[in-house]
Amino acid sequence: MKNSGRLSLVVLCILSFNEFNFVQSAKESVIVVVISDVIATNNQNMVPILKEITNYFRPKGQSTDVRFVPVVTSKNLTETVDIVCDLLATGMSGLIDLSPPKLSPLLRALCQDLNVAYVLLVDNSYHFYMADRLESNGTHVAIEPVSYQMLQIVVDIAEKEQLNSIALFYDETFDIQNTPRRVLTNVPVPHIYLPLSNNASQTEQQIDTMIKINIKTVMVIADRFNVQNFLSLLTRKRIINFDPNIFVLTKDAKLNCPSCQANLRLLLMTAKQSTDAQLQFIEFMRTSRIDAELETDKIKVDEAYVYDVARLVIDAVDSLTKLGIEVDTLKDLDCNNETQTSNPDHVIQSQALVSAVTQSSVSGVFGALSWKPRDGVLKYNLSLTVSEVLFEQGIQKSKVQIAEWTQTGHLKMSVPSLLKVQLRRHYRVVTIPGIPPFVYKSTNDSASIEYSGFCIDLLEKIAELVDFDYSIYDTDQVGSVDDTGQWSGAIRELIDGRADIAVGPISVMNERETVIDFTVPYYDLVGLTILMKKPKVDYSLVKFLSVMDEEVWGCIIGAFVLFSVLICVFDRLSPFSYQNRKSQWRGEGEEPRIFTLKEGIWFCMMSLTPQGGGETPKALSGRLIAATWWLFGFIIIATYTANLAAFLTVSRLETPIESLDDLSKQVKVQYAPENGSMAMIYFRRMADIESMFYEIWKNMTLKSENIGSIDKAQLAVWDYPVSDKYTKLWDTMNKNTFPVNVEAAIKRVVNEDFAFIADATTNKYQALINCDVMEVGEEFSRKPYALAIREGSPMKNELNNAILRLINNRTLEELKSKWWKKDAKECSKDEDESDGISIRNIGGVFLVIVIGSALSLITLALECYWYRVRPKRRNKKSTTSGSQPTFSDTSFTSGYEADKNGTRETNMCSDSASDMSGPEFGVSNRGFESSESYVVTGKVDHQDVGRDVAMSTNVHTERL
């Protein structure tokens, strides 16, 4: 519909021109203006301006009529060429070119062949590929487009502010779509061109792309309506980690943003208007009734530009007329006549018109429009203003000019920088909680989520060094790739641009490095280890008693008591024992032993020790019973010693699992990693690789037709030459089932015969907080931990430098010490069986010493009481009752003397309760028949008493 309307307009213009030809004088100059449909659409007043400008200036003293015939191009460029050719045939004085790139070179070629004056208003780069053919013969002139001039401010800002990343959003207003990637040509600034679309979803995708590549500066080069739509979508997203500097370059004088949903700061770059020419243009627009309500802030650059060019042409024609040179309409110009010769009069007129145009100048709406010999073109003396505009919820709060740009002085600023005062940068961080001590997740009193741990402290330290703020959220896993190539977890957050940094125990892996980047490692190489249940060691102070069963010990004690009684009884009953034949002892040497019950117990006890039982019974029957006890004791001691050695040795013969190979060789203990973990992926891939090797070997040895029989024979072996360890491990893991999480794995380790394979850090932490498990084996498949960032992120170098500084000043070592000790439990030290028997197992032996020593002290106390305190009490009672004096403290008389004098006879097998002599009291009863005090009656000679006491004491001492 638009094209047909434009075509009708062109036809109407042609008809009007033809009708006008019949009534006008020969002094009329017809200038055809070919306008791109894009330019005409964005500037609705351009065609009316060209039609009305001659009528407006005729009363002002113009001597020659200049009529502008606008031709708006259609999508079918052939139709436009036909219209132009018809106008050439009808007659024209010159052609002003505002056509699209595909048509402009053709129009210039037609004008050159037909010697028609040609004024180029579009970018000269359209004609580069025809430069050799389109050498001007003085009939062509170029006026530098305003769009090209305005775009130069973008280059100056990029260089002045040293911008490092720019996204250029553009529409068709500045003709960038026809001259792609030339705005920042030869400027070392990373940038991307993004065409604006009327499709909101497509624009949102472009914004997401800009965020993903971490753009810092946004340049929007478009008309005000497209700018408003873009800003509305940008503020609607409310991106936390995106606060770029926004520059807007538009050909409109005013910008509103009523649909902006957030506070916004932008720098608006607009063309500066000349006051006098501006008022004249407004008067023209109102008088001609093109726009009766036109205001200063509604003037469009392209419309004013065409208005100024038309004035320039009118002035040029008028100047020639005043010199007597008439600019006639050149007629009978045939586009299809290749044999048409050049008309010298046409050449002279066109050259004169072009020369007059270059020598003319006007005070344009946006500056003086004049010839620039140095550049070889006519151009505006354009100035641009840079204003800081603040919007709050769609309402403009302020607009302050902070810089100005000119052709000569370029950018002059009234502020130190055009960029906004940068607050601390804000990044969005994703973490993986539940992996202590790296990341803890908790809820505080205000019900808000808090994160802590080694990685969180590390992030705080880095934020202080790099100077940024961050907001943090969590996801359930680090992430892995599925069969379709899609990632999950924190890595997916980075790929989609929802996060800038991923913090946690994230291993550096080749497959991850294809989609994201990593910083330098912040943690040592971490591999996989095995977590197993700690073997329980039964400690006992009387472990030496557990060598034999309780029934055996009962029988041994019974035999001990039995033989102790038997020895006493046999010694008492045998007529050949000493106690029954005392009269035969002649008093030479030590007195023979009398086996009372106490002596029998002592004999049996000492016979079990290396000390021996001492003197044996004199009677043959007593000796036989003693020999029987010796034989029994020898067997018992030998059996006990052998069993004790075996008991302690067997406990050390159990071979513990200390490596993955040990785990694969046994069947008692099940094993598996966590489902979906990197450990699981590692074993699955290793098994797949072994399977691939097996298939290669099988195909090479059995199925390959390219290998000769001799080579096949050399490859034929009984055993498969490549290890299948991981294939067997993987098969076993699948049978054992994979734990769904670490907690479930630890539960199985504690309650079952199960080994959990996981990262060394995970197993180490579980061993620290749970005394029932332990980490075994050396680490394998070791990889470092690092921070993950988006691919191509510019913050990588800053983060690397911060981590290296923390490593050099040992901050990371301090953090490790802090968090690894935080939850550690005080577990009992594991006993190394190779170091010998622990005190906790043999301590009962020392307990025997303690008990024996205690009993000895108690017995010593009783002895002191019995031999010293009690006789004194009896003597005291005798004195008070009038009895004869008693010398109890010194009246020890040997049994030998008593027997010699025949005054006392003792039955040794039936000792009274008061007879406390014996080996258990440390005093031998050999030669001691009684320790009672003797009472002396009658007159006592004290000298004789003293002598007797001394003699008695000497005898006693000697026998002891």
Image: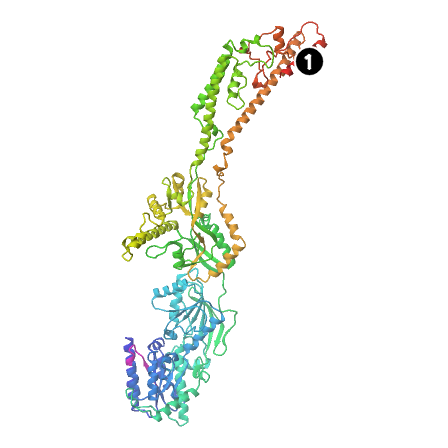
In this orientation, which residue lies closer to the viewer: 931 or 65? 931
505 to 142, vertically: above or below: above
Residue name at image x 41 percent, y 87 percent: 357
Outermost residue on the bottom side: it is 324
Vertical comparison of 481 with 620: above or below: below
Residue 597 position, x and y percent, is: 52, 15
Q: Nearer the viewer, residue 12 or 809?
A: 809
Instruction: Give, as a single range, the part of the protein colored magenta.
Output: 68-79
On the question of residue 561 being in view, the answer is no
Determine if residue 465 is in view. yes
Q: For the residue marked with disc 1, what is the amino acid?
A: Ala
Q: Position of residue 916 (x, y in %)?
A: 57, 15
Quarter of the image that includes the N terminus? bottom left
- Decide whether residue 78 is among the magenta residues: yes
Given residues 583 and 365, the one toward you in this image is 583
Q: Using residue 566 as the reference point, say whether residue 14 is left or right of it.
A: left
Mark 1 — residue?
A: 950
